[in-house]
Image (cartoon, helix red, strand yellow):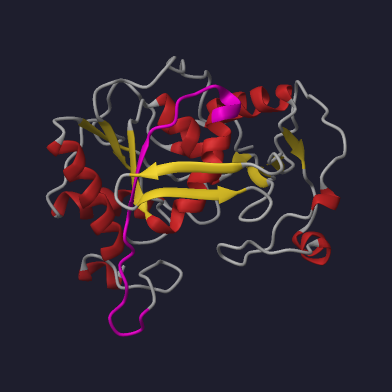
Amino acid sequence: VYLGSRMKASPQLPASPSTAYRGRIAPTPSGWLHHGHAATFLTAWKRARDANGSIVYRDEDIDPDRCRDSYSIGAIEDLRLCGLDWDEGPDIGGPHAPYRQSERIILYYDTLKTLAQQGVVYPSPHSRKEITKAHTARSTVDQSPLFPSILRPAEIVPCDDPDPYIPWRFRVPAGRSISFIDGRTGQHSFSTNKDFSDFLVWRREGVPAYELAVVVDDHAMEITEVVRGEDLLLSTARQILLYDALGWTPPNWWHCPLVMDPETGQRLSKSNRSLPLHPHRLNQ
């Protein structure tokens, strides 16, 4: 039901990123913004303005179970109250509309088809219980379970019409080192099948996973630098593999330090129930 329900045609993808600086602010409306979000978005905004560039506001409302319209509206209001502005976005329009991921599903599915036709993704209908039972190794970065190779199809089978209501995974090449330079923290390198393994690009709900959605959007919106939290450094390595498979040029990267709660020492996050950016949200 979700797939294609709000979008009749795919926007044309540009051939390559623009040379002018283009940044983005991309909140996920699954809760109220907190001070960690504000710090990252302020950095993104400042880097764009210092470069005399433009900035895109993108509403990453791809998860139908967690995202709410009230959070989307609240995020725009809260960042406006902080003095941030942008040049394109859901509240002002612009040449790269639409700016809500829930309205871009066909574009993501077309990209999934491209990957499936190459045979670099495969259907992965396994339950979480099956994956947990079969896994034998953990990531050397964050100790999360690596996807078990025993559950990966032995043969590469191209597919012209991937089923959008089963999960699909990217087939991570063995023995590769994925290196990139972060504008703030310098050189990083991650090893496939040690630091990360086959990862989801499509979910059984008929929507893309985070890694695929942001790669497609950042390319389509011609983003030249991605500014986000340093908890997503490992995601950058995964996304570089997607850029390579699609023949697209990756943007530059700038990963911000995480903001920690001074009382608990935990990083600010929605899952940790961090206080919202503006106190009036506590009663909403």
The residue closer to the viewer here, 165 or 186, is: 186
The quarter of the displayed image where residue 19 is located: top left
Q: Which quadrant of the rendered structure holds the N terminus?
A: top right
Residue 31 falls inside the magenta stretch: no
Residues rendered magenta in the picture: 244-265
> Is residue 34 something that shows in the picture?
no
Q: How many marks?
A: 0
Residue 248 falls inside the magenta stretch: yes
Q: Is residue 93 above or below residue 134?
A: above
Question: Which residue is depicted at the point 39% across and 43% down?
Answer: 181
> Is residue 95 something that shows in the picture?
yes
Question: Which residue is depicted at the point 65% across and 39% down?
Answer: 206
214 relative to 140 in the view: left or right: left
The quarter of the displayed image where residue 35 is located: bottom left
158 relative to 103 in the view: left or right: right
Q: Is residue 221 above or below residue 2?
A: above
Magenta-colored segment: predominant secondary structure: loop
The residue closer to the viewer here, 21 or 270, is: 21
Q: Is residue 14 above or below residue 47?
A: above
Question: Which residue is depicted at the point 60% across and 40% down?
Answer: 207
96 relative to 121 in the view: left or right: left
Q: Position of residue 9 (x, y in %)?
A: 52, 18
Question: Which residue is depicted at the point 56% across and 62% down?
Answer: 141
Q: Position of residue 177 (x, y in %)?
A: 58, 44
Q: Position of residue 224 (x, y in %)?
A: 33, 30
Q: Which quadrant of the rendered structure holds the C terminus?
A: bottom left
